[in-house]
Structure formats: C-alpha cells, structure tokens
Image (cartoon, rainbow, N blue to C red):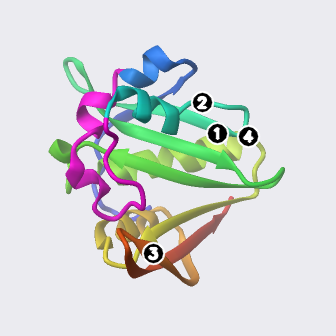
Amino acid sequence: MDNFKIPQVQLRRLHDADAVSQFYEILSDASIYTYITAPAPRDINEFLGRHRPTPSNMVFGAYFRAEDENHVGLLEIRLDDMESASIGYFVGVTYWGKGFASAMIHLATEEARTMGLRKIFGIADSRNTASIRALERNGFVRNGERLTMLKMKASTDIVLSRVL
C-alpha cells in the first residue's frame, strides 16, 4: 500500500440478519447505488435479502474506530472457487473520500489470505474512479474490461485482481 493515510477500521464478520440490519440506515442512501447495477433497496427486507451471509458469501461490518464505533459500511467476500474470491463493498456517503474503502479493501485482502485464497477480484464501473483508485492502492491490477448494463444503459466495468 502506498503512503496514502487510511483511517483505522475494524471488520467484524456478521453472522445473522440482525447484525446486517444495523447497516441498513447508512447503506440505503440512493447515492451509493449510482455505479451499482441494483437500485437502492426499497426496504430493510430487500436489503437483508441482498446481503445475507451464506457459506460462499461472507459479510463483514466495517466500523470506524473512534471514541464510539460508527458504522462505516459493509464488505462482502464471495468465494468464486477454492482458490479465488470477489469482493464487494459499500461505504456510507458520510465516509466517502476519506480512505474508508481503501481500509476495507486492505482488510479484505488480509482476510482472504488467512482463508488460504490465492487470488482476489474487484470489479468497478469505469466511471467510479474512487473505487478503482482504492483497489489499485491495495495492489490490484487491471485485468480488462467488460461491457455491462447499468440502470438500463450500456456501461463498462473494470476488472481488477490481486495475487495473494
């Protein structure tokens, strides 16, 4: 990781819907879903349905380590196979541009390494330069592009990966 100063963030694995629901308030803001295929969740049940922990989808809550532990966002590690995984992350709007995504990605790569994974992938819309930059700060390199649809319009995703 370069000299970019990242905030102190702690990840905690969330095992149930009650724990995931704590993040609904900060992660239901429509602004967060600008570069995400799915729209903002209509309600908490839809949010929980999307982010339910499963054996192949580990959900982590991200907490800012301040005087009180503020909810910052969610991070998901989805197992692709026995050697690789994809990560996805959501950061509350209040925390944008402050290094929280970089901190979460850093912790995700450490978690993936402890799981014995050999490679981790991240995908970001080509216009989401902040997310691409956060992945690259964490040693991810561009592997290519893929055409996709975003909000009923053609879009391009950047595929990045990191060998662990």
Pair 3/2: label in front: 3
Label 3, label 1: how far apart the Cα atoms are: 23 Å
Magenta residues? 22-42
**Quadrant in the picture for the N terminus:** bottom left
Is residue 67 located in the magenta-colored stretch of the structure?
no
Which amino acid type corresponds to the residue marked 3 in the rendered image?
A: Met
Label 2, label 4: how far apart the Cα atoms are: 16 Å
Question: What number is the disc on residue 53?
Answer: 2
**Quadrant in the picture for the C terminus:** bottom right
Identify the residue at horizontal 22%, vertical 25% (top origin).
Answer: 66
Question: What number is the disc on residue 57?
Answer: 1
Front-most of residues 80 and 4: 80
Dots 1, 2 in contact, CB < 8 A: yes
Q: Is residue 97 above or below residue 40?
A: below
> From the viewer's perspective, is 54 left or right of 8?
right
Front-most of residues 83 and 45: 45
Image location of residue 29, percent across then percent down: 22, 43
Which amino acid type corresponds to the residue marked 1 in the rendered image?
A: Asn
Residue highlighted by disc 3: 149
Residue highlighted by disc 4: 115
Give the secondary structure at mark 2: loop
